[in-house]
Amino acid sequence: MFIRNDIFSAAQPIPITSLTLRKERYLHEIGHAIGLVHEHQHPNRDQYIEILYQNVQPSMRIWFNKYSAQEVDQLKVDYEYSSVMHYGITAFSSDGKSQTIKALHPDKESSIGRVYRKELSFTDVKIVNLMYQCAKQCDSSIVCNNGGYVDQNCKCICPDGSDSCSKAKQDDKDGECFNAHESWQCAVWANQGKFQRNPRFMLESCKKACRQRET
């Protein structure tokens, strides 16, 4: 997910349809409204994906074209297959089933998924924080390692959803406490209160995230 340099040049309407009533879809549309572009249109996308234009509906090919580095500021945030701003691998195919986006690393295609099943990725949240300078009031001495960022509360947010990448903290050495599921997703679920709604699943799949939420 990356931002356009003309973000404030015009109002961005958010279409309300039966599709955008799904949380994942309105997250995608709100992303556009605050200045985010499609992940697969990122200037460096050719290092990560291939667009199979021959399978894309002709009228929709514009939404697969690549932006230039002059049009989009990446803010040094990495490309993310799981971004809510990334189209699915069969998005807008001419026959409704052919692949339109191919990951150069095949094992990443499952991460691309489909927009209507996604949550915000770590990079989605990170770039909005950077774009709107949410940590502007924070002390510059706060440093986050391993790709983490300082949030509006002047805390480090790390790619796994914890704050363990803060220089002021030691990494968690407890090998008995780990997430069986993807750590960022576990952190999102924990913040959304899924531990209270489905404690058995969370303790089995997201034990580390649950413990971090309780501390």
Image (cartoon, helix red, strand yellow):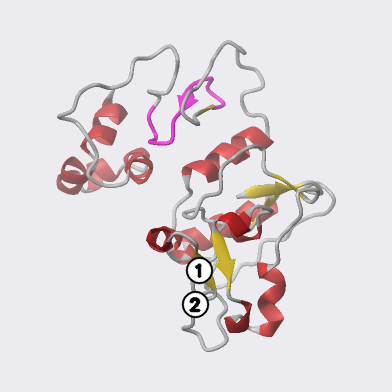
Image: 116 above or below 178? below
- The amino acid type found where label 2 is placed reads Gln
Q: Which residue is at 61% across, 83% downward? A: 54
Image: 183 above or below 19? above
Q: Which residue is at 45% across, 14% downward? A: 167
Q: Is 120 covered by the magenta stretch?
A: no
Asked if residue 184 lies left or right of residue 154, the reply is: left
Q: Kindly identify which residue carries mark 2.
A: 99
Provide residue 109's location: percent of width, then percent of height. Answer: 42, 63
Provide residue 61's location: percent of width, then percent of height. Answer: 68, 76
Q: Does the magenta stretch mainly form a helix, a strand or a loop? A: loop
Region of the chain picked out in magenta, as a range: 150-162
Q: Is 158 covered by the magenta stretch?
A: yes
- Mark-to-mark CA distance, 1 and 2: 7 Å
SS for tag 2?
loop
Image: 46 above or below 56? above
Q: Kindly identify which residue carries mark 1.
A: 102
- The amino acid type found where label 1 is placed reads Lys
Q: Could you tell me how many numbered marks the image carries?
A: 2
Q: Quadrant of residue 105?
A: bottom left
Q: Which mark is residue 132?
A: none
Is the Cβ of the residue at disc 1 closer than 8 Å to that at disc 2? yes
**Quarter occupied by the C terminus:** top left
Provide residue 128's location: percent of width, then percent of height. Answer: 61, 40
The residue lying toward the viewer, choosing from 24 and 96, is 96
Asked if residue 89 lies left or right of residue 184, the reply is: right
